[in-house]
């Protein structure tokens, strides 16, 4: 079946089964391997992308549900939110192994778009991605730093 998806600002026409999870379309069909497979049941968040700006676990999202929506992966040209997060990740040395970081950044970007100045409680409630290295304190610091940067008072 032919399905048209809007991925990173480009229309992509794919001949794919409609139930195919977005993760496998991104990785196997389009070569966008920044989105990672972690658990396959939407628990870990390594596969997080933005769908119409909302953090979405791509490992369980069938492509048929995404027609007409804007899908953004970590490979997209960084907008100001993602760029601020990437700079903050470097500043706070967030990643250790880095495996979960593309999904973590996509989830954090979604949070900052909806809550420009999140509290620790907001971050803990919204960022449910798992980090096997346990860098949660640095992730939280990075999100706060990116929020401050975006508000013009970089810390």
Image (spheres, rainbow, N blue to C red):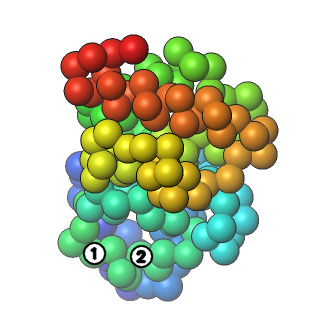
Q: Nearer the viewer, residue 140 or 69?
A: 140
Where's the N terminus, which quadrant? Answer: bottom left
Tag of residue 67: 1
Image: 138 above or below 115: above
Question: What's the residue at 48%, 57% (across, down)?
Answer: 126
Question: What's the residue at 30%, 49% (across, down)?
Answer: 115
Characterize the local packing of mark 2: few (<14), some (14-19) or many (20 or more) Cα atoms within 10 angstroms.
many
Tag of residue 127: none
Q: Nearer the viewer, residue 33 or 40?
A: 40
Question: Is residue 30 shown to the viewer in this render?
Answer: no
Which residue reaches farthest right?
A: 133
Where's the C terminus, which quadrant? Answer: top left
Task: Where is residue 80? Give x, y as percent.
Answer: 26, 30
Task: Where is residue 23? Give x, y as percent.
Answer: 54, 63
Left or right, residue 81 beside residue 95: left
Callout 1 secondary element: loop
Question: What's the residue at 50%, 29% (across, down)?
Answer: 142
Q: CA distance from mark 1 to mark 2?
A: 7 Å
Callout 2 secondary element: helix
Left or right, residue 70 beside residue 65: left
Image: 90 above or below 81: above
Question: What's the residue at 65%, 67% (across, down)?
Answer: 43
Task: Where is residue 154? Give x, y as percent.
Answer: 33, 15
Left or right, residue 31 beside residue 133: left
Task: Where is residue 18? Give x, y as percent.
Answer: 44, 84
Tag of residue 63: 2
Question: Is residue 39 shown to the viewer in this render?
Answer: yes
Q: CB under 8 Å between callouts 1 and 2?
A: yes
């Amino acid at each position: 079946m032919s399905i048209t998806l809007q991925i990173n600002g480009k229309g992509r026409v794919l001949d794919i089964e409609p139930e195919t999870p977005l993760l496998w379309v991104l990785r196997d069909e389009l070569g966008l391997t920044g989105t990672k497979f972690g658990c396959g049941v939407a628990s870990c968040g390594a596969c997080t992308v933005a769908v119409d700006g909302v953090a979405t676990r791509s490992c369980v999202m069938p492509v048929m549900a995404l027609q007409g929506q804007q899908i953004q992966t970590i490979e997209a040209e960084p907008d100001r939110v993602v760029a601020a997060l990437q700079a903050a990740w470097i500043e706070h040395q967030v990643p250790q192994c880095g495996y979960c970081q593309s999904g973590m950044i996509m989830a954090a970007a979604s949070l900052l778009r909806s809550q420009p100045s999140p509290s620790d409680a907001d971050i803990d409630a919204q960022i449910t991605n798992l980090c096997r290295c346990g860098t949660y304190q640095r992730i939280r610091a990075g999100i706060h730093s990116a929020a401050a940067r975006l508000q013009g008072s970089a810390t």
